[in-house]
Amino acid sequence: MTTAHEVFEDNERNQRVLDRSRRWRALLDVLALTGRLTVTEAARRLGVSEATVRRDFTALAEQQLVTRTHGGVVAAAVAYDLPARYRAGGESDAQERIATVAAGLLEPGTVVAFNGGTTTSATARKLAARTDLSGTPGRPAITVVTNALNIAAEMVLRHHIRTVTLGGVARPQSYELTGPLANLVLEQLWIDVLVLGVDGFTLDATSTRNEAEAGVNTMFVKRSEKVVVVAGSEKLGRRTFARICSSSAVDTLVTDTDADSEAVEGLRDKGIDVILA
C-alpha cells in the first residue's frame, strides 16, 4: 500500500519545486491517503514556503476540495482520483470575470447545462466553488448536464452537484461528446438554463467552427428554458462555420467590457440582456 511519505518522495524526485497544479496534485494525493495535512508538513515535503502552502490550501478550500483547519487542511467528502480535480489557471482576466458573473446567475435547485469550451469550463468551475451550494449534505444543490468530459470530471468531484453526461463520440480537440447518441439523450431531458459557449455571435445568429458540435449545441438550445451565452468581446460580430441558433433564442449574453458598443446596443435592441463583466 502506498504511504503518504512515498507519494511525497516520488514528487520530490521528479521536481523539487513544483508548479501550482502539480503541488495541488501532490497535496490531494496525500489527503486521499491520510485525510489530514498540516502546513508545516506540506511545506517541508514540497520544498516550498509555508506562505505558498497556505495559499494553495486557501485555493483548494475555495474550490471545496478541502476543508481548512487551524494549521492545515482535512479532506473534503469528494473523490481524488481524476486528473481534472486540480486543473486551474490559464483563464484571462476577462474570462474570469465573465465566468464569475455567469455562475452567479444560476439558481440553486435548477438543472444547468454546459457545452464545451474554455469559458463554459471556467463558469462551471466558478459554480462548483459557490459556498451557498454546499450546505445540504447528501442532497444535490444543483444538477449539471454536459457533453464536455472535462467539465463532467470536475463536477462529479463535488458531492453537492448531480452530474449528468451525454453519450456520443468524444472530440479530442474540445472534450465534447457529439453525434446521434448525444441528441437521443438530450431529447429526454428538460433543462432550466443552458450556459452556451460560442465561437461567433452576430446580430443574426450564434455559431461554432465544428458542425458536429453545432448539432448538439442546437439541441441543447431547444431543450432549455433559458439560454445564457458566455463569450469574450472578440467573438461579437464574428460568424464561424456552423450555425447553432438564431440570436432571438438567446436570453442573456455575458461578455467583457471591451465589447464594441455598437454590437452591444444591436444585441440589446434584439431583446437580449447584455451583461458586461
Image (cartoon, rainbow, N blue to C red):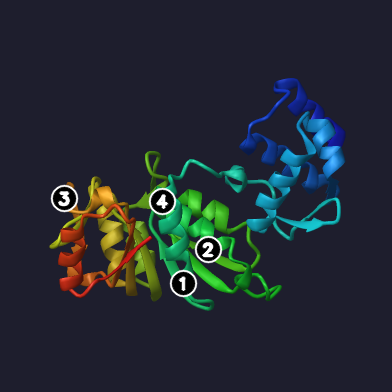
> What's the residue type where badge 3 is placed?
Arg
Identified at 70% across, 46% down, the residue is: 55
Discs 1, 4 touching: Cβ within 8 Å? no
Crowd tier of the residue under label 2, counting other residues whose Cα lies within 10 Å: few below 14, some 14–19, many 20 or above: many
Q: CA distance from mark 3 to mark 1?
A: 28 Å
Q: Position of residue 115 (x, y in %)?
A: 38, 57
Q: CA distance from mark 2 to mark 3?
A: 29 Å
Residue mark closest to the camera, 2 vs 4: 4
Viewer-side residue, 81 vs 206: 206
Q: CA distance from mark 4 to mark 3?
A: 20 Å
> What's the residue type where badge 4 is placed?
Gln
Discs 2, 1 touching: Cβ within 8 Å? yes
Q: Position of residue 2 (x, y in %)?
A: 83, 36
Identify the secondary structure beneath mark 2: helix
Identify the secondary structure beneath mark 3: loop
Q: Is residue 199 visible?
A: no
- In the image, taking residue 111 as reference, residue 133 lies left or right, namely right
> What's the residue type where badge 2 is placed?
Leu
Discs 4, 3 touching: Cβ within 8 Å? no
